[in-house]
Image (cartoon, helix red, strand yellow):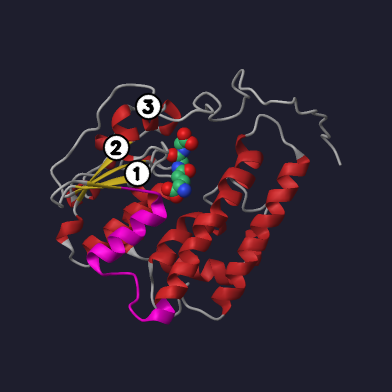
Amino acid sequence: MTNEIEYTPPKVWTWEKPNGGDFAGINRPTAGARVDKELPVGRHPLQLYSMGTPNGVKVTIMLEELLELGHSGAEYDAWLVRIGDGGQFNSGFVALNPNSKIPVLQDRSTPNPIRVFESGSILLYLAEKFNTFLPHDLVTRTETMNWLFWQMSSAPYLGGGFGHFYAYAPKKFEYAIDRFSMEVKRQLDVLDQHLANNEFMSGHDYTIADISIFPWYGGLVLGWLYEAGEFLSVHQYKNVRRWADTVYARPAVKRGRMVNQVRGDLSQQLHERHEASDFDTKTQDKLVK
Ligand SMILES: N[C@@H](CCC(=O)N[C@@H](CS)C(=O)NCC(=O)O)C(=O)O
């Protein structure tokens, strides 16, 4: 094995300096607000504070799907939180999510505004509020929840594990990249075998399980994450690719992917979304600095 590194942990770990790599500048071993700054509030019932990462995109896809079905109560303002600049540590954000991670939703249609954090919790909250994308029968509902929880517990190996060491760490460590590549390929195989016999994650119906898994594993096989498609031989997972193509053919998924997006083709970036018509106008005009 190359890149062998020797490290003898001290008796007590202490944080002394940023460790290099992307995001090192914002990471600290403590929680709580760093800056006193309130969040903006728009006119719609739902206020979303997010960025177009896979976890953020889950929620904007869900909201766009609900609007596509005619649920006007799902109208939302999507505010951009630039996590690289530390917006998640502003006091207004921390009041909604003490964990300082996007996405976070505030429902202001209720007598007292309700905060919802953790993308899985947000998907479940919206599915229950609008009685959509969560099957009613016990078997399919349970299968949907199985895969929703599977995604929430599996994706950190893909993002925080593989993505971090393959794309963001200051050096390439073979041990770490091997360990997480192995796990991510195992996860892709889990999905591939399941999708060989199922149209969607819970069977015949498109649910919050698909909405949750698509931005991560669908994005991976479509070549959107970490430029790792070739490295992980994602072409092997033909059933995942078939499912990802089916999901991405949905207009709401295409729109949801654009909201709060700051990466990729400029024409696919809608930094803030306040009206359905925002998608129609030339998006470059809407860029928020
Ligand atoms: N389990 C959380 C994870 C959220 C998360 O990790 N968000 C990342 C972006 S994808 C973030 O806000 N990172 C900022 C930071 O770590 O300071 C969820 O699904 O909502």
Instruction: Please give the name of the residue rendered at 37% of the width and 26% of the height, measured from the top-left corner.
Output: 33
- Compute the Cα span from label 2 to label 1: 7 Å
Q: Is residue 154 left or right of residue 135?
A: right
Q: Which residue is mark 1?
A: 267
> Mark 3 — residue?
33
Please state which amino acid type lies under the numbered disc 3. Ala
Contact, mark 3 vs mark 1 (Cβ under 8 Å): no
Q: Quadrant of residue 36?
A: top left
Which secondary structure, mark 2?
Answer: helix
Residue 190: percent from left, percent from top: 62, 68
The magenta segment is 116-140
Residue 175 point in image, percent of width and height:
77, 43
| Element marked by disc 3 | loop
The secondary structure type at the circle numbered 1 is: helix
Circle 2 is placed at which residue position? 284
Q: Residue at x 22, y 67 (%)?
A: 69
Q: Is residue 204 visible?
A: no
Alpha-carbon span between mark 3 and mark 1:
34 Å
Q: In the image, residue 240 lies at what x, y percent?
A: 55, 67
For marks 3 and 1, give the one nearer the viewer. 3
Instruction: Say whether residue 260 is left or right of residue 169.
Output: left
Residue that protrudes farthest toward the right in the picture: 1
